[in-house]
Image (tube, coloured by chain):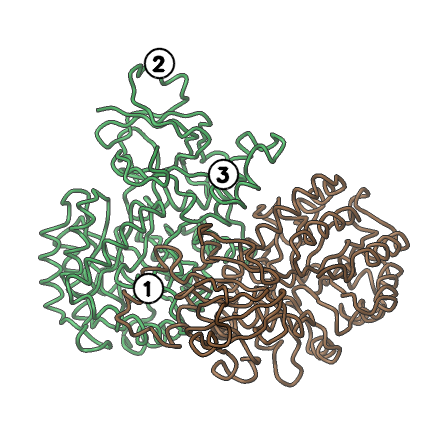
Chain colours: A brown, B green
């Protein structure tokens, strides 16, 4: 069956950090998106395109913005219940809040309740794909994938591997983590739209033997991801260096087990040397920039400009890092990404911001052949944004209040920036997953 | 007429930065607030207090938090329309966006529309008192006060004085700014709950003659405030130093015209020397800490710990600084205040945060005899907060989800912190101004 959505189509055909904003953003003010069997069949000007589909069943979102679904490249579903917990830096945060909460995920019903809530919240925030930490318990991955499968979502997740330096009830062993991960991969990787990420927590909680097992999984299952943490705080780096005295720097801890690949995503990467950045670049690995978390834990300011430096650019996606991040909204996350950049005299335009949420995010997790923009054949995960969703956004963005000066592309770019600064879940009017309407604020639509 | 509100009463009896959180926050889990003629008549435990008022008409907000109304100590109502405008540091921001927008406030109907929207938005965000910049046009102050007067709000505002270094249509002259301010003071200061602030924009736009006129107004009208900007960015400081070569530092620019008093509020104060902080402390002046604005413009990190240092503490309130601030919500503002502190290895607890919004804010604008907590005789401006207002807050904060462990005071403190991190206007269930219900989300209450 073929169906259509009419609205202002906004996506990216290239990288604005390389090509400039104007050469990468694509705006069809009165656009039509044509969907067939969960994929994009066509996109273009409504009046021109509709002629070819005379009987098209079309939902009219005129005045709203239709964008590819957002991609969150680092988030812990097992920490959704402790979001906004007070007063700690990373290592204390883990000990005080995280481990205590994650221990509860031994209970499959507790896990399921969290997974359902988390996935519904993601959708209501316009996030259709995420790279997700579960807990150490295989069942926490099972229920997460079950629930994501029901919703037909493109989700990537994995069981935490950790065998030391955490409470006993949360520890696996290197061989056990290998066996459990392997079973989960065999059962879930590639089932529906689901993908698996081998997920060692980080060097502090993983022995060399365990990291080697992770590397073995990557070799045995070439399509799976590697998802871990890297260089988030100085204390973490210091402790990691103590635990791995044979490694010259943090990245080498992962390199020695062959975990630094073109399917590896490292969360944070705030405090990396030039050498580490260059090696990440050469390996085509990615960093997940998690601004709300980095600020909340006081971890530091991620230097986006340096990481994207054209001599050795590293792929970057945006992560909420809930529970240390303070929200699942990608608007709120971009708000603080902008501010982290501004403090370093860098400018994150709305084109660059939304690129990172869509095509850039897809590239950073090697899914840009499937996701990220409205190219024909890509999976039809997309969101409909109401740029006037709150009283303040309406006051600022409603054309009736702006004397018509903001009716063109410049106005759209400007309004997108206001959504970066002030948007929240109310802006997400509707969400389509695999071409199906999965969520709508106004159920009457 | 006497009326009552039942709910969890939360206010402050002292300064948690000095006394510690436990010795300053006051929580009455099942509380009753008794109001008579717009003032607090009594507060206490519901069951104990209700006996004394057997026929009390009481609104039941059981399970909700009742707090004093929030105080925003620095905001520009004339910039509400340009909130979230892209990519500039302070001086460029003024030239690119602000002056263009403020010029429109020559039109009294434009001003009125903005004033009405701004005041309604303040109320819906739980802000019942604010220290407000209008534009250079006296009529922008007139309509603002007219609309605040209609709503019986405790508002402080003033006409911008600026006679140089801005577009011609926005300039007054020193004598003209004196005369216009004087007329406004005579008409509005003390009318209803309104108060006037003499409002030179900052040294860059004010000659010595104009600053002297501002000082003259302070002397002629001892009850009025002084409201201006100070040490927001390094470029601003450099230019100010060039314009006032006879002054050793920025603060001296204001001191020489006798503008540094116990009724003076200086926005920002990010880049102040120890000497300037000490002189502000000795003068009992205040600083408005505006975290969302400071981050948005990339101005720098306000050092709250240093400013409150017990050897020479300076009074501090919290400002949104809209339009450079990215929202009128005091929750969103505290979220970023927490993060600015965290980046400097400081901890802003929920008690300290909400203290700054209430009693601390009132002290910083010398209104703690009238506002800021539930002491008998104070003005009955208060807000009702729903700690479970959004799906995510409900998931985190609902007692049913927390196995009862968060039912006591610790749970309330913890939930308040979650509101700092994740709250928005949806948390504001109701707002009472002068004892009257001015706003309620659920109109059926």
**Residue B332 got which mark?**
none
Q: CA distance from mark 1 to mark 3?
A: 44 Å
Q: Is residue A87 above or below residue B435?
A: below
What residue appears at the point 52 percent right and 44 percent down from the top-left corner?
Answer: B391
| Quarter occupied by the C terminus of chain A | bottom left
Instruction: Please say whether residue B197 is visible from this viewpoint.
Output: yes
Q: Which residue is mark 3?
A: B21
Q: Are marks 1 and 3 in contact (CB under 8 Å)?
A: no
Marks 2 and 1: which is nearer the front? 1
Q: Earlier in the sequence, mark 3 or mark 2?
A: 3
Along the line of sight, which residue is nearer the eye, A273 or A335?
Answer: A335
Q: CA distance from mark 3 to mark 2?
A: 31 Å
SS state under label 3:
loop
Do the residues at discs 2 and 1 belong to one chain?
Answer: no
Q: Residues within 10 Å of mark 1 (few under 14, many from 20)?
A: some
SS state under label 2:
loop
Do the residues at discs 3 and 2 belong to one chain?
Answer: yes
| Quarter occupied by the N terminus of chain A | bottom right
**Residue A398 got which mark?**
1
Along the line of sight, which residue is nearer the eye, B21 or B103?
Answer: B103
Residue B160: horizontal and vertical position, in percent? 21, 64
Q: Which residue is mark 2?
A: B51
């Amino acid at each position: 069956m073929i169906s259509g959505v009419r609205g202002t189509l906004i996506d990216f055909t290239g990288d604005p950090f390389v090509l400039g904003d104007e050469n990468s953003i694509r705006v069809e003010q009165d656009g039509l998106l044509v969907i067939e069997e969960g994929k994009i069949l066509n996109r273009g000007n409504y009046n021109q395109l509709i002629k070819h589909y005379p009987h098209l069943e079309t939902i009219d979102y005129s005045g709203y913005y239709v964008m590819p679904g957002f991609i969150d490249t680092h988030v812990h579903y097992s920490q959704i219940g402790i979001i906004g917990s007070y007063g700690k830096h990373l290592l204390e945060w883990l000990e005080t809040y995280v481990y205590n909460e994650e221990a509860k995920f031994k209970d499959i019903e507790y896990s399921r309740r969290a997974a359902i809530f988390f996935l519904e919240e993601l959708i209501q925030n316009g996030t259709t794909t995420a790279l997700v930490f579960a807990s150490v318990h295989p069942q926490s991955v099972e229920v997460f994938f079950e629930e994501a499968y029901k919703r037909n979502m493109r989700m990537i997740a994995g069981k935490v591997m950790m065998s030391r330096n955490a409470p006993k009830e949360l520890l696996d062993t290197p061989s056990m983590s290998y066996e459990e991960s392997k079973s989960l991969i065999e059962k879930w990787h590639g089932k529906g739209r689901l993908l698996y990420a081998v997920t060692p927590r980080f060097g502090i909680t993983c022995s060399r033997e365990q990291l080697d097992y992770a590397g073995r999984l990557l070799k045995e299952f070439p399509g799976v991801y590697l998802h871990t943490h890297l260089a988030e705080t100085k204390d973490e780096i210091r402790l990691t260096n103590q635990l791995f005295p044979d490694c010259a720097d943090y990245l080498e801890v992962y390199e020695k087990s062959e975990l630094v690949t073109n399917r590896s995503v490292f969360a944070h990467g705030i405090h990396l040397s030039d050498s580490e950045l260059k090696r990440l670049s050469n390996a085509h690995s990615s960093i997940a920039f998690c601004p709300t978390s980095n600020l909340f834990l006081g971890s530091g300011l991620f230097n986006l400009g340096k990481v994207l430096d054209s001599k050795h650019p590293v792929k970057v996606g945006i992560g909420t890092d809930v529970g240390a991040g303070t929200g699942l909204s990608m608007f709120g996350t971009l708000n603080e990404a902008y501010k982290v950049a501004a403090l370093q005299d860098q400018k994150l335009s709305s084109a660059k911001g939304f690129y990172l949420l869509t095509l850039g995010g897809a590239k950073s997790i090697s899914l840009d052949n499937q996701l990220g923009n409205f190219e024909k054949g890509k999976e039809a995960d997309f969101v409909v944004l109401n740029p006037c969703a709150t009283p303040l956004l309406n006051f600022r963005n409603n054309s009736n209040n702006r004397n018509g000066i903001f009716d063109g592309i410049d106005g759209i770019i400007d309004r997108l920036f206001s959504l970066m600064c002030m948007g929240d879940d109310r802006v997400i009017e509707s969400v389509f997953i695999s071409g199906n309407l999965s969520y709508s604020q106004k159920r009457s639509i």
